Image: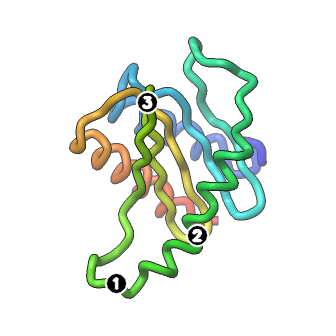
Amino acid sequence: MTASTNGDDLEDELISVCRTAIGDGLRSITYFTADDYEQLYLRDDLERDADIERFVANERLGFTSQQTYGDSELGDYGFTIRSFEWGYVTRVIDGEHGVYVTTDSLNMNEFDEVATAIRSVLEETAP
C-alpha cells in the first residue's frame, strides 16, 4: 500500500493524532489491512532496516481476535498493548483496517488517548 492508495489525508491525520497524544515518545506508526501495510512514520533515531513484516503478521491476528472476543462479557474490543523492555506496541483495529504504534513508556491514560484518536480516524476512513 502507498499513502496515495489510502489517501494522504489518512496518513497525515494518523501522524497528527499520534504525535499529539504521544509527543516525542512516538517511535513508529504502521497502517495495515489483511493484505497490505505501510509504515507511515518512523522516528529519526531508529533503525530503518527493521523487519516490520513480522510485526504486521502478528498484529493482523487482531482481525480474528475481534471475532473471538466479540460476544464476551468484557464488552467491545478497544485496543491491545504489548510491553517490551524498551517500549510498547499499541494496536487498534476497526473493521478491515488497523494501526499499530510503537512508543516509549506511556501511562495508561496516554495509551487510551492515542487508541481513541486512532479509532476515530479509522472509523472515518473505512476501506
Element under label 1?
Answer: loop
Residue type at mark 2: give it.
Answer: Phe
Q: How is the image coloured?
A: rainbow
Residue located beneath label 1 in the image:
72
Q: Nearer the viewer, mark 2 or mark 3?
A: 3
Q: Which mark is residue 63?
A: 2
Q: Residue at x 49, y 74 (%)?
A: 66
Q: Nearer the viewer, residue 108 or 39?
A: 108
For residue 63, what is the image quadrant?
A: bottom right
The 10 Å Cα crowd at callout 3, few under 14, some 14 to 19, many 20 or more, is: few
- Percent across and percent down for residue 52 are 69, 39
For residue 127, what is the image quadrant?
A: bottom right
Q: Nearer the viewer, residue 127 or 77?
A: 77
Residue located beneath label 3 in the image:
85
Q: Nearer the viewer, mark 3 or mark 1?
A: 3
Cα–Cα gap, marks 2 and 3: 26 Å
- Farthest residue toward the bottom? 71
Sequence-first tag of 2 and 1: 2
Sequence-first tag of 3 and 1: 1
- Percent across and percent down for residue 124 are 48, 60
Residue type at mark 1: give it.
Answer: Ser
